[in-house]
Image (cartoon, helix red, strand yellow):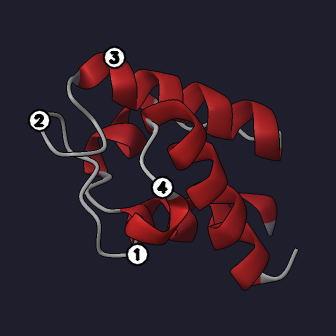
Amino acid sequence: MIEGRVHEKVVKILSRITHVPENKILATTSITPGCRLCRDSFDVIEIVMALDDEFDIDITNPETQKLETVGDITTLVEGKIHI
């Protein structure tokens, strides 16, 4: 899968879950609990579950704890689907 497509899918998933318009979600947008995209840790869990399903990957809890931005998500997903 081409990297741009991974980022595009990640943004679509985030937008669907958080109701933030896609054009407001940038690679630098924070996904830490308490930010605009993730009100709490349950939002992060929902996002990770959606990513696991969409890309047929398994994001571990330690990996989840390291995610801070949308770009971090894209990089992680790209690495997992290219394994």
Q: Circle 3 sits on which residue?
A: 42
Residue drawn at the location 25% of the way across and 56% of the way down: 68
Side (left or right) of 5 relative to 63: right
- 48 over 67 or under it: above or below: above
Calculate the distance from the C-alpha at mark 4 to the C-alpha at mark 1: 14 Å
Badge 1 or badge 2: first in the primary sequence: 1
Q: Circle 1 sits on which residue?
A: 27
Residue drawn at the location 39% of the way across and 66% of the way down: 24
What SS does tag 3 mark? helix
Residue drawn at the location 29% of the way across and 65% of the way down: 29
Badge 3 or badge 2: first in the primary sequence: 2
Q: At label 3, which amino acid type do we have?
A: Phe
User: In the image as oriented, which residue stretches furthest toward the left?
Assistant: 34
Calculate the distance from the C-alpha at mark 3 to the C-alpha at mark 2: 11 Å
Badge 4 or badge 2: first in the primary sequence: 4
What SS does tag 4 mark? loop
Q: Circle 2 sits on which residue?
A: 34
* Residue 52 seen in the current view: yes
Do callouts 4 and 1 mark residues in contact (Cβ within 8 Å)?
no
Q: Quarter of the image holding residue 27?
A: bottom left
Do callouts 3 and 4 mark residues in contact (Cβ within 8 Å)?
no
Badge 3 or badge 4: first in the primary sequence: 4
Calculate the distance from the C-alpha at mark 1 to the C-alpha at mark 2: 18 Å
Q: At label 4, which amino acid type do we have?
A: Pro
Q: Circle 4 sits on which residue?
A: 21
